[in-house]
Image (tube, rainbow, N blue to C red):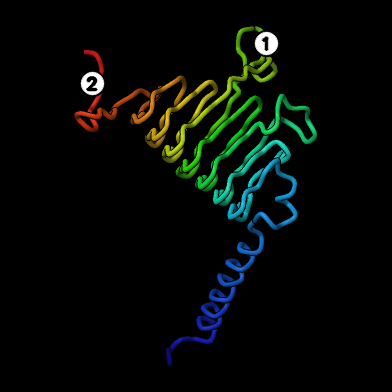
Amino acid sequence: MAGMSLRVRFRRWLGVGLRRLRRYVNDVETIGPLDPPAHRFYYFGDGAGLMAPQGVLLNEHSISIGEGTLVGPGVSVSAGYSPGQTLPRDPVVDIGCRCVIGRYSDIVGHERIVVGDDVQTGPGVYITDQNHGYEDVDQPIGTQAPHNKPVEIGAGSWIGAHAVILPGTRLGEHTVVAAGAVVRGEFPARVVLAGVPARVVRRWDSALGWTTVREPS
């Protein structure tokens, strides 16, 4: 310490102060059920929180956040395309109780996305109920009419980092989705999904426990 230059001591002092300030600001910016922004949501349960910094929050009146759910920093949750849009139902995005949505994930709903109770996701997960149409090969895909199919994630499931949940997906309860998997379709409860496209690689058998599912040779 004695040999440390004034410049180095100042830098260390300033760094400690800035980190403390950042933690304080993030704590203050976190949205809880008593904060004014929470009142814009269709429902915002007791003990729920949207950590700072928040991502895009669009049409909160059609987004429901259950009790005790924690939405990580940088997470975007949107219902529809634009503010004030007429939506098919309220809520469009319904996140259950005691969920954890990993940082920088995106939940983009247009028709209906239901996340059951006690679901947790890793960082960077993408969940959507809409895809672009591509039927007309002479028209740019981005300008073609989209297709919506509801998504449902069963209670108690775990969605690994950077997994993608596509329109029409229905996951049974206690499903594990491996990191980086791309999931479409309906799957039973208590299975492990992995791959692109995702398939069942393990399933629970009441007599045998967890068993590996072999691909057909």
**Circle 2 sits in a helix, a strand or a loop, which is it?**
loop
Looking at this view, is 209 or 145 the one in front?
Answer: 209
Q: Earlier in the sequence, mark 1 or mark 2?
A: 1
Q: Which mark is residue 123?
A: none
Q: Who's the residue at 66% across and 31% down the image? A: 92
Q: Who's the residue at 23% across and 27% down the image? A: 212
Q: Quadrant of the C terminus?
A: top left
Looking at this view, is 205 or 179 the one in front?
Answer: 205
- Residue under label 1: 139
Q: Is residue 21 left or right of residue 188?
A: right
* Amino acid identity at mark 2: Arg
Depicted 3 relative to depicted 122: above or below: below
Query: Which residue of the protein is positioned furthest toward the right in this rendering?
Result: 84
Q: Is residue 95 left or right of residue 79?
A: left
- Residue under label 2: 214
Q: Is residue 130 left or right of residue 60?
A: left
The percent position of residue 58, horizontal first and vertical second, equals: 71, 39
Q: How many marks?
A: 2
* Amino acid identity at mark 1: Gln
Q: Who's the residue at 47% across and 41% down the image? A: 119
Looking at this view, is 150 or 137 the one in front?
Answer: 150
The percent position of residue 42, horizontal first and vertical second, equals: 70, 40
Depicted 65 relative to depicted 178: above or below: below
Question: Do the CB atoms of the residues marked 1 and 2 lie less than 8 Å apart?
Answer: no
Depicted 71 relative to depicted 78: above or below: below
Q: Who's the residue at 35% across and 31% down the image? A: 190
The percent position of residue 151, horizontal first and vertical second, equals: 54, 26
Q: Residues within 10 Å of mark 1 (few under 14, many from 20)?
A: few
Looking at this view, is 140 or 78 the one in front?
Answer: 78
Q: Residues within 10 Å of mark 2 (few under 14, many from 20)?
A: few
Q: Nearer the viewer, mark 1 or mark 2?
A: 2
